[in-house]
Amino acid sequence: MKKWISIVLGAVMATGVCALSGCKENDKSKVTLDPVSATVETWEAPASLGRNKNYTVEVSADGKTWQELAVYNVKNGHQLGDKLINSAGGVYFGEPYTASLAMFDFTGTAGIRVTYAKTLSKGGYVISPASYGVKSVQDGNTVTFTLTQDARAPRKIVFRPVDEWEAETLHIMTNVPESTNKQDPAASNVYVIEAGDEVPLSLPEGKTVYYFKAGRHVLPGGYWAEIDLGRKTTVKSFDLLTPSLNANTLPGGLCFELKAQADDGAWNSVYRSVGEEAEHNVNLRDVKIDVTAQRFRIVLHGNFNWQPVGDYRFIHKANISELRLLNADGVNVALGKAVAGSGADYAGVTDGAEGGAYGNAYAGETFAVQSGYTYYLEKGSVVEGAFLGNGRENVTIAGRGILDSGHLVSTHDLSEGRNGAIRFEHMKNVLVEGITMLHAPMWMCVINYSENVRVDGVNLFGYCTNADGIHFSASKNAVATGCFIRTTDDLFVAYHYGDSNGLRFENSVLWSDGGRALLLGLANTGDIRNVTMENCDIINFQNVWDLEQAGGAVQIVASGGKTIANVTVRNMRIDAVRFPSIAQFLQIRAGIDAYGTGFVQGVRLENVSYASERSPKSLLSVMVAGGGVQDVTFQRVSVCGTEIAASNISQYFRKDADIAVQFES
C-alpha cells in the first residue's frame, strides 16, 4: 500500500519545491510529496573508508519507516595552479576538500530525508539536477523529498546549501538493484575472496569470477609474467635485460621482484629491488641466487627515474626485453617457457629475442585483468588499487563495491605517468557496471583502442589534476550510460588517438570542477565519427587555464589534419553554474597550436539549454588556417532562456563569417 508524505507548509519552519536557484517558500499552499512505494537495498562499507559528519541521510521504502545510510568521505578539488578560478572570484589553495557521499539501490519511489549538521537557513538549499523537479519540504535543518527511479537514467542527486559548492555538498548515488551481472558466491566458477585474503594474480582452472566479499581488499600491483620450467630445477643466477633507451622507456632503473613457487603453492620472493636501490637496474647480468623450483614469476613494479619529476622519482612505466634463468652450467632453462602474464604478449619474456619489450606504461601499481574473467565487487567491498588490461577480451568489472585508487603513489600536480582506476587498451567486449571509483590520480576510466564497450551506472569522483572521467579514444561501439562523474578535469573524452566510431554518452549527471563535460579532438592520429551525447544533466562546470584553448561545456576541436564528423548533442541540460564568467557554453573549432588544424563535418545540437548568463561568448571558428567547419545545425538551443537564432547568434557566439549555421524550429 502506498504511503503519502503530506506536510502543511505553515506547520514547519520552511517548506518548498526545490528549484534551480534553491527552495522557494510558499506559506499559503500545501506541498504533497509523491506517494512512496519502493524496493530499497542498502549496504555499508568498512569503517576504515571514513564517515562524514556533515549529513545524516535516511531512506524510506514506505514513507513510514526510515533506515539510516552510511555517509562516506569523498574528495573533490580543482586543478592545481588554475588562475581562472581565482579570476572568477573563487579561491583554491591546492589541497582537495572532503565532501559527503551516500549510496543505495532502489526501484519505485523512495522517501529521502537529509539532515544537515550545521544551520540550514529557511529555504536555503538546492537539490540538483534541476530537471528532476524534486519536490521537498524543510523542517529546520532536515529536508524530506521523494525520488522516483529511472532504470534508463538512474537517479544521481547532489544536495547542498545555497552558495555552497565544495565541502558542504552531499552526493546521493543510486542505481536499480543488480540483476544480470550479480554473481552467486556459491557458483562453481566463482573464486571467493574474503576481506584480508591474498588476491591471486590469476585463478585456478575452472574459476572465472573474482568475488570480492564485503570488507577491504588490496589488489597486488605489478606487471608480471610466469615461467614454468616443466620440472623442479635449481637456478643459480639470472639475467634481466631492459630495452635500449628510446621512446618506449624512461631513463631510470627497473623496480622488480623475482618470485618462486614453493611446494605448498605459495609464491616466495627470491630477489627484490625497488626504490632508490633500483636506480642502476639496467641490463642486469649474472645476478646470483640459489633456488630450486618449477615455476618462477617476474613482477615489474615500475621505474626509479634518474631525474625527478618535481620531487617525484617513482614512475609506473616498466619494460623488460628478456629474462634468463641460468643453471649451474650457465644454461638458460627459461628459454621458451613463459606460460602466462599480465599482457597477452607474455611469451616475449623468454623467447630469446632480446630486442623486444614486455611491460606497460602503467605497470607499477596496477592489477592486470585476464580474458574471460569477471571481477565482482560485492556491496560493502572496498578494493584498493587499479585495474589494467591490454589485448584482452570478454572482461567484466561489476557490482556495487568501491574501487579506491587513492592509495596509489602520486602527487596532486604530477601530470602523465600516473595510474587511474581502470586503464584498458586494445580490448574487446568490456563491461564496467555499477561500481563507484574514488580518488584516482589520473584519468579514471580509460578504455581506448577497444571495441564493444559498455560503462553502465558507475559513479566517479576525482580530485587531482588530470583526473578525467571516461575516455573512449580510438574505440568503436562504446557506450557510457547512467553515470555520475564529478572531477577536476574533462568528463567524457575521445582524442584523435586513432579512428573512433559509434561513441555514445547518455543518461548521465555531470559536474566538472575544471574542464569540459564532452571533449572531442586534440592529437593527430585518426578520425572521430558518429558521436552522440544524449539526455545528460550538467550540474556545474567551469573551464580551466585558458578559455580560448580549453573552453566549453562541449568542446569539439579537430586537429592534426583529422576529421570529427557526425556529432549529435541532444536533450542536454546545463544548470546555472557557480562561475558563469569562466564557463563557456560551447566550442566548435578546427585547429589548435600544438597539432595544427583539422575538419569538423556535421554537428547537430537539439534541445540543449544553458541556464546561466550568456558571457563569455561561445566559439565557432577555424582557429588555424587550412581547416574547416561545416554543416552545423541548432534546434531549440537556448542560453539563459533565450533561443539562439540567426538574428541573435552574434550575441552568444564569436563566429567566423564564412561558417554557416542552420536553425530548425
Image: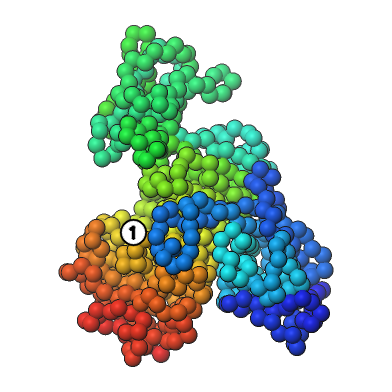
Percent across and percent down for residue 232 are 47, 15
For this orientation, the residue located farthest to the top is 329
Percent across and percent down for residue 170 are 63, 62
Quadrant of the snapshot with the N terminus: bottom right
Q: Residues within 10 Å of mark 1 (few under 14, many from 20)?
A: many
For this orientation, the residue located farthest to the left is 626
Relative height, residue 174 to residue 23 (above, below): above
Point 43% across, 58% down: residue: 489
Question: Residue 140 occupies which quadrant of the picture?
Answer: bottom right
Q: Is residue 355 left or right of residue 46?
A: left
Q: Where is mark 1, residue-wise?
A: 495
Quadrant of the snapshot with the C terminus: bottom left
What's under tag 1, amino acid-wise? Tyr
Residue closer to the observer: 103 or 612: 612
Q: Secondary structure at mark 1?
A: strand
Q: Is residue 529 left or right of residue 13?
A: left
> What kind of colouring is applied to the model shown?
rainbow
Q: Is residue 396 visible?
A: no
Question: Residue 642 occupies which quadrant of the picture?
Answer: bottom left
Point 74% across, 68% down: residue: 142
Percent across and percent down for residue 529 are 33, 66
Percent across and percent down for residue 485 are 51, 60
